[in-house]
Image (cartoon, rainbow, N blue to C red):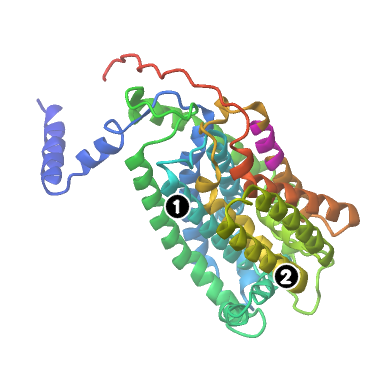
Amino acid sequence: MADRAPRRRAAAARRWLDERLPLSALWASQTSGHRVPDNFNVWYLFGSLALAVFAIQYVSGFFLAMHYKPDASLAFDSVEAIRRDVPWGWLIRDVHAAGASAFFVVVYLHMFRGLLYGSYRKPRELVWLLGCALFVALIAEAFCGYLLPWGQMSYWGAQVIVNLIAAIPWVGPDLALWLRGDYVVGDATLNRFFAFHVIALPLLLIALIAVHIVALQHVGSNNPEGVDAPHATVPFHPYYTVHDLFGLCVFLCAFAAVVFFAPDFGGLVLEPANFTPADPLRTPAHIAPVWYLTPFYAMLRATTATTLRLWALAVAVALAAAAWRRRRAPRRLALLLAGGAVLLAALLRVDAKTWGVAVLGGSIAVLFALPWLDRAPQRSMRWRPRWHLALLLAFVLAFAALAVVGSQPPSAAGHVVAVAATFVYFGFLGLMPWWSRLGRCATPPAPMRAAPRAGR
C-alpha cells in the first residue's frame, strides 16, 4: 500500500493540473493522436533534427551570453576568456560554433527533401513559404552571430555585406547606416548585432517555427510517393518518435565527433583568420563568408559587366521564344515585350554592383515562388521522367560548386564556374514552368491501407 501512495498522489496532481491546463490532452493530440503517412524514410529526419539543433544553439548561446561582452574593445578577449578561463567554456563555444554549421546542413537537406518529393505543392504552399521565411531569418541570425567574435574575418565580412546593402537603390544607404549605427563598422554595430542575435531574431525564429509546425499539422505531411492517402497513416507516437530518436542519436554521435576531434573542421567551422583580433587598418587578402553562405556570395561575385551582357542575351532569347508562343494574344504579347524591354535596358544600363545585390536577393526570393513554378502533374520525382531528377541533381551540383568557388580567392577559372553554376541555378527555377510540364509522368499505384498494429 505504501508503494502505491506516491502513484496515487502523482495521478491526483496530474488530474488537478489537467482540469485547469489540458497539457495531457495537448500532448496526446500532438503525438499519439496525430497521424502521419506510414512510408516516411530517412529524408524525413531532418525537420526534427533542425528543431533539435535549434535547441542546442539556444541553450549553448544562453551560456555564452553570460560571459560575452558586446564591446569592440572587449569582445575578442571575452571569447578567448570563455575558451580558456570559464569552466567547460571551450566545450560550449565549440558546440555553438559547430551547431551553426550543423543547423545549415540539416536545413539544406530538409529543403532538398522538399524539392525531391514536391512538398511545396498544393495544399502545402504556406508551409513552404514559412520554411523559406525561416531560412531567411536563419541567414540573418547566422550573419549577426558571425560578427560577435570580433575576429579579423568577422569584422571584414560584416564590412563587405553591410556595404553591399548600401548598394540597394533608394533605401540601401539609410538601411546600411541604421545597421551599422555609425559610418563604419564599430562598437555601435557590435551592440546592434548582439541585440539582433540574442533577442530579436531568436524570438522571430521561435514564432516562425511554431506557425510552421501548426500549418504542417493542419494540412498534413507529404510522403515520398507524393500522393495523399488519409487512410494509410500511423500515429506519430510511438512509431516516428522512435524513428526520430534513433536519427537524433546518430546525428549527436557525428556532432560530438566534430566537436571533440575536429572543432575547426579544416577551417570551415572556425576560420583561422578569426583567431586574430579585428584590425580595421589591415584588410585580409581574401574575404569570404562562412561556408553555408558562400553559394550566394559566389553568385554576387560572378555578377560582372560581362556577365550582365550574357544575362541580356539569355533574356532576349527567352523573350523571343515567349513572344512566339503568345503571337496570337496581342495584349499579352505587348505586355511581355514591354516588360522584356525594360529588363534588357536595366541589364545594360544599371551597374554590376547593384545587379549583384539583385542576383543575391533573387536567388533566395525565387524559392518563395516555387509552389507556383512547378507545373508537373505529379509531386514526387519518383513518378516523373528520369531527366527531371537529373535536372534536380544538376541544380544541387551547381549549388555545391558555388559553395566551393565562393570560398576560394577570385580566379579566372573560378569565375567561369560561378557564372555557369549561377545560370544553372536560375535556369532550373526560372524555366521550371516550362520544363516541368514536359515528359510523361508515371501513374503512382493506389496507396494501400496501413496494416493494423497493436495499440491502434
**In this view of the protein, which residue sits in the foreground, 85 or 195?**
195
Q: Amino acid at mark 1?
A: Leu
Circle number at residue 400: none
Any part of residue 314 in sight: yes
Residue at image x 46%, y 18%? 445
User: What residue sits right under mark 1 in the picture?
Assistant: 130
Give above or below for 46 relative to 297.
Answer: above
**Residue 35 appears at what percent x and percent y?**
32, 30
Any part of residue 81 in sight: no
Residue at image x 69%, y 32%? 390
**Residue 370 appears at what percent x and percent y?**
54, 48
User: What residue sits right under mark 2 in the picture?
Assistant: 345
Q: Which residues are magenta?
A: 388-395
Q: Is residue 390 magenta?
A: yes
Q: Secondary structure at mark 2?
A: helix
Give above or below for 301 relative to 317.
Answer: below
